[in-house]
Image: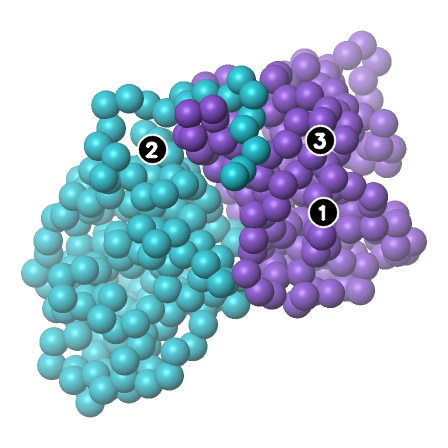
Chain colours: A purple, B cyan
Amino acid sequence: MAGAAVLGRLTWRVATIRDMREETARAKSLVLDVPDWPGHLAGQHVDVRLTAEDGYQAQRSYSIASAPEARGLELTIERIDDGEVSPYLVDEARPGDRFELRGPIGGYFVWHAGLDGPLGLIAGGSGLVPLMAMLRHRRAAEATNDARLLVSAPRFDDLLYRDELDGARITLTRQAPPGWDGFTRRIDAEMLQAIWPAPGARFYVCGPTPFVEEAARLLVGLGHEPAAVRTERFGPTGG
Amino acid sequence: MPPISRGFRSRRRTGLDPSRVPPGQYVTDDFPVLSAGPTPHTPLDQWSFAVGGAMEAGRSWTWEELLALPAETVTVDIHCVTKWSKLDTRWTGVSVDVLLEETQPWGDYVVAFCDGGYTTNLPLEDVTGGRAWIAYEFDGEPLEPEHGGPVRLLVPHLYFWKSAKWVRGLNVTDTDEPGFWETYGYHNRGDPWQEQRYWGD
């Protein structure tokens, strides 16, 4: 499976939107039917290609949010206001609409339940998407390894997948609701040390560049092996 | 015929020379960062750059020795496989031709190796003939660590993952040995004008 998911030519397939779910005011999950989808690993992404009436095309990459076990391929897309593809997918697209897609892409930032040992997941904003695919896969595979998730977001309303964050450690960096008992500051060494007191976890860090740079730097500073820290980043040019 | 996305329109910037933007790319003024792991920070007094492998005579340089080599400043367009292109980027560094002078390589390929364990493979002819540099300045400033500093490989005519960050040397080989991303599904050569993004493209 691990090899099969990336072998061979990645052909463009036509995806049909089966369902859409609002995750936040800026983000939606799109559940897609993709005929002959070859399967994927948690953490991988796809390329999406839109075609306008005049033939103009634009491509962007989006992380897969669904577990490999799920029925339908799910992407979560956050609107980037001056972007080209994300405002269309979040605001204009409707169930039944079709667009092209190819993948899965990326074989390094992946986790599967056959990998032993503790799992450390650190997400900044919509960097949670590929990490949620890992947690959903872990649940579906009934894996029992230790898994801890730290999510950083500006406000509570910015959090993706709020119904699935039981047990996650959350830090809200700009504003917290009354009675909030999670963290309320930018990630720091003390926060990471409290969640991962000893080395040994396999880390996946995803978010905007400054967040990922800082998280990876802090982990290495706390004695975690650089080779145990896998990173994936996206910034405002994700479009 | 691909399906038409009802209501989707180009928001592409106008006034761009289309002959400078490869298929599937869009132009940005930002300089996004992509890497697979933590940013390494090797102190410059422990840093060196080496060329070796399938050649008559390997060589290496300390940081000061590298800076003493003849430098060039080039203005080039760069293209990342994640779809962004950035036009007219200005870099200063040493041509790979200079580094390979007097080494007499007999292999036809190179593997660039880096702090952090990253590697990427290229045909020797893609890094010679004035087409590749070891760059230590971006836009007149020292290259920042997150962009590959102190030194990154610069091969602007290929997708930018070939321009390996934190590069520490070039190993000439007589067989083609796929590097890091090349073994994880990305194209072996990566010519943006042929849209060689992934295996089989």
Neighbor class of circle 2 (other Cα within 10 Å; few <14, some 14-19, many 20+) is some
Q: Residue at x 25, y 66 (%)?
A: B126
Query: Which disc number belongs to residue A35?
Result: 1
Chain at numbered mark 3? A
Give the residue type that dot 3 points to. Ile
Secondary structure at numbered mark 3: strand
Whether labels 1 and 2 share one chain: no
Q: Distance between the Cα atoms at labels 3 and 2?
A: 28 Å
Give the residue type that dot 1 points to. Pro
Q: Quadrant of residue B100?
A: bottom left
For marks 1 and 3, give the one nearer the viewer.
Answer: 1
Q: Distance between the Cα atoms at labels 1 and 3?
A: 12 Å
Locate residue A208 relative to residue B188 in the image: left or right: right
Residue linked to disc 3: A17
Q: Residue at x 77, y 64 (%)?
A: A115
- B105 shown above or below B164: below
Locate residue A201 relative to residue A106 in the image: left or right: right
Count of numbered circles on the image? 3
Q: Residue at x 51, y 21 (%)?
A: B8
Locate residue B87 relative to residue A168 in the image: left or right: left
- Point out residue A152 in the picture as x, y percentages from the top left corner: 66, 30
Q: Distance between the Cα atoms at labels 1 and 2?
A: 32 Å
A65 or A158: which is nearer to us? A65
Which of marks 3 and 1 precedes in the sequence?
A: 3
Extreme-left residue of the structure: B70
Residue linked to disc 2: B27
Q: Quadrant of residue A101?
A: top right
Chain at numbered mark 2? B
Secondary structure at numbered mark 1: loop
Q: Quadrant of residue B104?
A: bottom left
Can see residue A8?
A: yes
Whether labels 1 and 3 share one chain: yes
